[in-house]
């Protein structure tokens, strides 16, 4: 089996082999299952005690930016873990459905990790995860709340009812929300914490980012199989700039610009650009 880049959904065949750059349909569910098995990690094994001690001493502006990002994560990860079930239920192939269930397990782990940050580092009020999620809404950007608590649940309901197509759901969930919105925030956190100020938080976000890479690759691989309409591809590309900007100044401009370019690059590499440019 050739190496795989989950950010683009391509297997990397050696040059000159003449091999297809895409995994055969019969092999890609089991391939992603193996990727997931290698990436498992324990939320509770990450030590946040040093982070909790360091947090009050960070400059006010830095804490403000990070609070915006962590509060958004706290709300968003709950939403994606709750709204992925219709995607698995939609699949007629049990192996494909299983990969969606594996993704849901990741999302549940991310939800727990960001709740730990909310409780142990930020000190958000609330004795329960639900109470801390409610408290996080006050610091999360309104555009993030709209995407994850209104738009995603609405589309998931449409998908569950059979009134939306799977490719529409994947374009929003995997390509926009995970591939743009969450990716932008992850990159902003990792850049901000490169100095080691919050080592436990940075370790956890690095692990979350690795999980999200295979999620995005899985979503792209599904789109390759589904061959979405030009309208779906056009809408995906059109949303990129706005989606990368939902965090406001908590995400630096250079990260927003880089992340906003990713949907076009992914669909081009995956040959979905043929759909996008067709007359």
Image (spheres, helix red, strand yellow):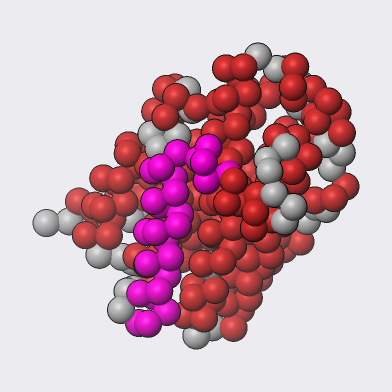
Q: Is residue 135 left or right of residue 163?
A: right
Name the residue located 83 percent from the left edge and 36 percent from the top edge: 48
The residue nearer to you, when weighing 213 against 206, is 206
The reply, left or right, for residue 192 in relation to residue 44 is left
Taking depth in this image into account, of 82 and 90 the one nearest to the observer is: 82
Q: Which residue sits at x=22%, y=59%?
A: 230
Instruction: Note whether 242 is above or below 76 in the view shown.
Output: above
Which sits in the foreground, 83 or 235?
83
Does residue 122 lie above or below 235 as drawn? above
- Is residue 126 something that shows in the picture? yes
**Which residue lies at the image location 52% right of the left edge and 81% below the top edge?**
89
Residue 225 on image: x %, y %? 42, 69
- In the image, residue 102 lies in the stretch drawn in magenta: no
Q: Which residue is at the front of the view, 201 or 74?
A: 74
Q: Is residue 139 magenta?
A: yes
What's the magenta region?
136-162
Q: What percent of the width, then of the height, locates residue 85?
A: 54, 73
The quadrant of the rendering that contains the N terminus is bottom right
Q: In terms of image quadrants, where is residue 245?
A: top left
| Quadrant hosting residue 259 | top left
Residue 198 in the image: x percent, y percent?
A: 76, 27
Please tell me whether residue 53 is drawn above or below residue 220 in the rendered image. Answer: above
């Amino acid at each position: 089996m050739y190496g795989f880049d989950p950010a683009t959904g391509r297997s990397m065949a050696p040059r000159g082999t003449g091999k297809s750059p895409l995994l055969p349909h019969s092999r890609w569910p089991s391939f992603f299952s193996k990727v997931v098995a290698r990436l498992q990690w324990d939320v509770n094994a990450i030590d946040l005690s040093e982070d909790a001690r360091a947090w009050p001493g960070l400059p006010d502006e830095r804490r403000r930016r990070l609070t915006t990002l962590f509060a958004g994560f706290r709300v968003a990860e709950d939403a994606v873990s709750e709204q992925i079930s219709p995607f698995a239920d939609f699949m007629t192939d049990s192996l494909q459905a299983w990969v969606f269930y594996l993704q849901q397990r990741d999302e549940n782990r991310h939800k727990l990790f960001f709740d730990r940050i909310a409780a142990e580092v930020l000190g958000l009020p609330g004795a329960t995860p639900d109470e801390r999620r409610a408290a996080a809404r006050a610091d999360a950007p309104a555009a993030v709340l709209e995407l994850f608590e209104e738009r995603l649940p609405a589309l998931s309901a449409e998908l569950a009812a059979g009134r939306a197509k799977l490719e529409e759901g994947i374009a929003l969930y995997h390509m926009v929300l995970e591939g743009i919105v969450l990716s932008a925030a992850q990159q902003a956190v990792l850049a901000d914490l490169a100095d080691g100020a919050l080592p436990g938080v940075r370790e956890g976000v690095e692990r979350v980012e690795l999980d999200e890479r295979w999620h995005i690759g899985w979503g792209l691989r599904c789109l390759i199989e589904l061959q979405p309409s030009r309208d779906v591809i056009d809408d995906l590309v059109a949303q990129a700039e706005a989606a990368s900007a939902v965090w406001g100044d908590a995400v630096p401009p250079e990260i927003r610009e880089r992340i906003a370019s990713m949907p076009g690059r992914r669909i081009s590499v995956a040959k979905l650009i043929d759909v996008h440019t067709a007359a």
